[in-house]
């Protein structure tokens, strides 16, 4: 089995070598091949974004190893919520988790039971977050507060006139400081479409004017 070691110390004067010795010994006892070491040196466990942890999770998604070994659960995360999120994602990508100090091993029957509980708690947490967001949106709507992005304020009539003059979508978008997609969408809305005859007539006027100047 391919194993990845994750080590973390909170301050720069601490040395992760003591953790490394125990983890290497555990991997050797179980006959696991250590294929990666991920270290966060001088980084607090309260930070959910860490270079070593982020790289380890990315490699887990790529299937580079089968099990993650840590010296203690608090090396992975200090908050229960973050710890559960990490375990849930590792379980999702079929990567097992082993903690040296707590003797947690998700490969065994007890470990699989723990993962079922972890998955249920993570799902409950996601459901609670969704419900809180929906409740907040309902409350904001009842209070008459705007939800989402502020509407784009543009002069649709000016856009129609610019289009009738023969300006391209890109030119109109640049002139009004909006996206080309927004221009196209506004012109397609009922009542905002520029009649094809207007463009055709304008084209004839331009050609006629050009011919007169050439003469």
Image: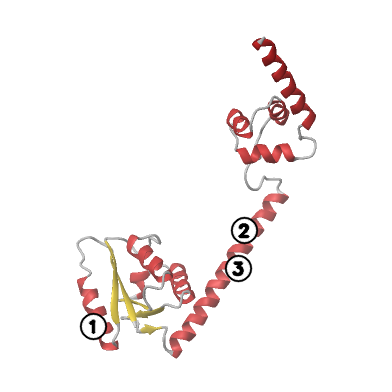
Residue 86, picture quadrant: bottom left
Mark 3 residue element: helix
Q: Position of residue 179 (x, y in %)?
A: 60, 38
Judge by depth and name the residue closer to the eye, 78 or 21.
21
Judge by depth and name the residue closer to the eye, 75 or 149.
149
The residue under label 2 is 133
N-terminal-most mark, 1 or 3:
1
N-terminal-most mark, 3 or 2:
3
Q: Is 158 placed left or right of 14 in the picture?
A: right
- Cβ atoms at labels 2 and 1 below 8 Å apart: no
Residue at 68% over, 27% down: 166
Mark 1 residue element: helix
The residue under label 1 is 25
For the residues labelled 2 and 1, the Cα–Cα distance comes to 47 Å
N-terminal-most mark, 2 or 1:
1
Residue at 65% over, 48% down: 147
Please rate how many residues cluster around mark 1, counting C-alpha atoms within 10 Å: few if below 14, some from 14 to 19, many from 20. Answer: few
Considering only vertical position in the picture, is 5 above or below 151?
A: below
The residue under label 3 is 127
Which residue sits furthest bottom? 109
Mark 2 residue element: helix
């Amino acid at each position: 089995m391919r194993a990845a070691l994750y080590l973390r110390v909170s301050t720069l004067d601490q040395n992760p070598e003591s953790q490394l010795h125990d983890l290497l010994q555990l991997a050797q006892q179980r006959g696991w091949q250590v294929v990666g070491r991920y270290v966060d040196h001088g980084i607090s466990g309260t930070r959910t974004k860490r270079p070593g942890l982020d790289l380890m999770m990315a490699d887990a998604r790529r299937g580079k190893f089968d099990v993650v070994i840590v010296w203690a659960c608090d090396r992975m995360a200090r908050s229960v919520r973050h710890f559960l999120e990490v375990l849930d994602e590792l379980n999702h990508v079929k990567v097992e988790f082993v903690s040296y100090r707590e003797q947690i091993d998700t490969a065994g029957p007890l470990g699989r039971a723990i993962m079922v509980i972890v998955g249920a708690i993570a799902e409950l947490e996601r459901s609670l977050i969704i419900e809180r967001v929906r409740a907040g949106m309902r409350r904001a709507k009842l209070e008459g507060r705007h939800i989402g992005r502020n509407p784009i304020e543009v002069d649709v009539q000016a856009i129609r006139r610019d289009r009738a003059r023969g300006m391209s979508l890109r030119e109109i978008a640049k002139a009004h400081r909006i996206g080309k997609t927004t221009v196209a969408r506004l012109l397609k809305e009922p009542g905002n479409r520029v009649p094809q005859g207007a463009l055709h007539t304008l084209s004839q006027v331009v050609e006629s004017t050009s011919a007169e100047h050439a003469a």
